[in-house]
Amino acid sequence: MRDNVLEVRDLRVEIPLPHSTVRAVNGASFTVSRGEALGLVGESGCGKSMTLRAILGLLPSPARIVGGEILFDGRDLTRVSPGELRDVRGRRISMIFQEPMTALNPVMRVGEQIAEAPRIHLGYDRQSAHERAIELLRLVGIPDPERRAGAYPHEFSGGMRQRVMIAIALSCEPDLILCDEPTTALDVTIQDQILKLLLDLREELGVSVVFVTHDLAVVAETCRSLAVMYAGQILETGEVRQVFREPRHPYTLGLMRAVPDFELVQSSLDSIPGTPPDLASLPPGCPFHPRCSFVEDDCVSGEFPLLPLADGRATACVHHDTCARAAREDPVVVDRESGG
Amino acid sequence: MSAVETTAPAAGAERARGFRNRWYRTPSFVAGLAIIGTLVVLGLLAPTIAPYNPIEQDLKSILKPPSQEHWLGTDQVGRDVLSRLIYAIRVDLKIGLLAVLFPFCIGTFLGCLAGYYGRWLDTVVMRLVDVVVAFPFLVLIIALVFVIGPGPRGIYIAITMVGWVSYARIVRGEILVAKRQEYVLAAQAAGFSDARIIARHILPNVITQAVVFAMSDIVLVIVAIVTLGYLGLGVQPPTADWGSMMAQGQDFITTRWEISTIPGLAVVLTGLGLSLIGDGLADLLRPE
Amino acid sequence: MAEALLQASGLHMHFPVGGSLFDRLGGREREVLRAVDGVDLEIRRGEALGLVGESGCGKSTLGRCIVGLYRPTAGEVRFEGELLPEKRGRAQRRRMQMVFQDPYSSLNPRMTVRQTLEELLRVHEIVSRSKVEERCRELLALVGLGNQFLDAYPRQFSGGQRQRVSIARALALEPDLLVADEPVSALDVSVQATVLRLLEELRQELGLTLLLIAHNMAVVRHVCDCVAVMYLGRIVETAPTEKLFSDPRHPYTQGLLRAVPRIVPGRTSATRGVAGDPPSPIRVPGGCRFHPRCSLAQEVCHEEDPNLETGPRVSEHAAACHFAWTETPKAHTPEVENPEGGT
């Protein structure tokens, strides 16, 4: 039994609005093993950011958790006191945001921002915290760290700021880092540098990561397992290579066929017909069924939790065999190692 | 050929159905409209409903308290206070409206030019704005009316000369943002004339701020007119207007308090109604 | 070979940056942002040219100069051989139209689709009055939208639908050249394919010439016949698509292609794309503008700015590097394999 650093079970987040209630997260379940990187993949509005925020208790009001459990280190984070949660935040679980421009305090020196968490959470004195900050800046690849620690965020480029954010996230040696689309706003070559940095750091420090993104290729390059999210639910989980070789959910298959990949040169791109559902009025049954090409009568009603499959995979589709067969007949990904 | 999309565009919430369908559901707008609407109706019907001629003096019954014949009593020259109050609606609302319309038009026009074309045009207009804004609003108006001469004509000119700046600033600011929107670029790429782009594409998206401001501006203007009237520089006697009524009645505040106070309440009520309309409009005119 | 539909020569687009009136009076030089800094580009009739580069490279600015939204600081643009004046006439503007990136600001929120289309048709007198309604429907059908969209407002549409309306708007004037500036970047991943397919179909059906500005290499590989890579205001390499991806000759192109993430990762964490940060277009490095980040930079690269030159036997493939056509394959290892057909 692998050691799980984080286990999310049937998480539910609602946003009560004057005329409706938006079910932003609608029964999401996934686990992150110690030292592993999990990619949480989905398009905009699927609830992935909300999930991350829920883990840290940082939901924007009026959103709130209305069900489920978030098990971290033996405790359910949905039920701990605010004081305990604050101890966890930044110290055991830290977060990296999408926009490096706005996630750093513009009027505080970079070194101070990195030093803040160790001083508060670990009781470092000023001098040691400063040294730690310099050490971290070096670790994340910022040249001339002693001098740069005294600089302000606006003196750094986008990629550099993202590195600073990573330094802040690492400052207390957390067990888990949550990344909310950290490279989406970056240029390709800068994204490449940051992804490489994250890979190196993970190898060196053994920290677990949840990587939220909409980019399947990024997940393929950085994560070992993935969870595919849609309309507030997790539809499929498993090891990245397995899932891409043989997707067992029509949404995953649809995504792979719709996204132009750099190397695969799909002969024709097929978008998924229709649009994602309104989270305030979800259709009954499987949330994906209105757009699904494998839909059957039993898809339109009932609940569809994740069904465990062999090899540690899981899917929410009861017709996953049909889907897998279709994927095999017209494969998107050819596994080079096995020769296809 | 890709499949023709037959699903209807999302209706969205009620907001999507626009002004026409929503206005009666916005409480502030309805309340404001009710107040101002009532005042307007009363003003229009003044000849029919006012019991007396507002300027007819009756020196035999001066300063009479409220009675069956004079619901609000009479003033110091025997004129019926109620009739004057009702007729004053016409004067004050009309002047208020016109005295906002002129600055609105001129300010919007100059703001458009400054915002869209920028550079020296912008500099000239903005420096002009700076000069006007350096003076306190009421002081400037009073000084101007004093020079031009009291009465409605003086009021219109003075308020226009001073009031245009707010509209110019608002409109210019909005246009600076709007002209970077891609639909404006698309219109330029399509070879539309500047005039068409400004009038047809930018202005409708930008004018709402100015309109909402205009609502509160009417209130300010009415206060200005009332102040001028109080100082004897506004509407000249014997025409009834709330300002001069308040001014003339202050001598009798201990005995016949109604003469000063009721017109004052009328001003407050008008201000309230306009503010509510302004709030409601701000809500309704937002395009999303 | 098809004739050139559009030619840009020596295009420069410089924007003055900051500096107050007093600075200028005091004689201090204003800084200049060189968004486009000497571009020669040719687009042939019927082809789809992809213009790629990262943020700040000037591709959007170049697109807007071509379409006539900006007046270039220097250089000229020729359409069908004719020089286009600084202030273009309506008839000239009709020949090229643009589709913009942001679906949320590219349509006037206060005009229905019908009003937007009708205005274009009327002002340019594309069809007679009686035919306007019919033409509007045809345009919508062309982009795969039904008639019920005619009287709706943009806020009622999804991002993908809005982009399609934008395309319909661009097509209303029946242009020869369509400049699409990142048309799918702001759309959800599953919807991008629809718009991309639409562009491809329109190209075939209408014989449209397409200039696709994008930062996503995968999209470009799918849609375009040839590609031009831009860096810091200059075109550093141009080639037919497959040639560019299989045999890139400029170090920046090579790095860029290595940096793109793929679903089937071939990289190890040791591979790297391009080091360093993109420099500012206000302070353009001397010599070859890429030399500060280039792992192969030599003495000459610090001093001389290389021109875009074709290779010895390849007239279609040009690169702006002193060593593009001279060095051994070791320095220019193609990192991208040719795609295998099918299994």
Image: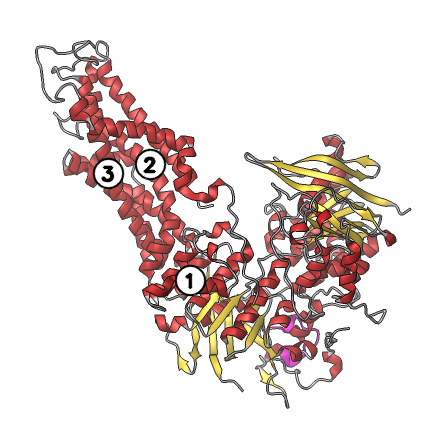
The residue carrying pointer 1 sits among few (fewer than 14), some (14 to 19) or many (20 or more) residues within 10 Å by Cα, namely: many
> Considering only order in the chain, which callout, 3 or 2, is on the residue closer to the N terminus?
3
- The numbered disc on residue B99 is 3
* Chain at tag 3: B
x and y, in percent, of residue B131 in the image: 29, 45
Structural distance between the alpha carbons of marks 1 and 3:
44 Å
Which residue does the numbered mark 2 point to in the structure image?
A: B215
Q: Residue furthest bottom?
A: C313
Which residue is found at the position 28% from the left and 23% from the top? B266
**Which amino acid is tagged 2?**
Met
Where's residue B4, x and y in %? 54, 61
Q: Is residue C302 above or below residue B75?
A: below
Q: Secondary structure at mark 2?
A: helix
Q: Is residue B117 visible?
A: yes
C140 in the magenta segment? no
Where residue C112 sits in the image (x, y, percent)? 42, 53
Here the colouring is: secondary structure
Q: Which of C228/B162 is in front?
A: C228
Question: SS at mark 3?
Answer: helix
Specify the amino acid type for callout 3: Ala
SS assignment at label 1: helix
Percent position of residue B195, x then y: 31, 59
Q: Nearer the viewer, mark 1 or mark 3?
A: 1
Kind of residue indicated by mark 1: Cys
Q: Which residue is mark 1?
A: C136
Magenta range is: C290-301
Q: Nearer the viewer, residue B232 or A281?
A: A281
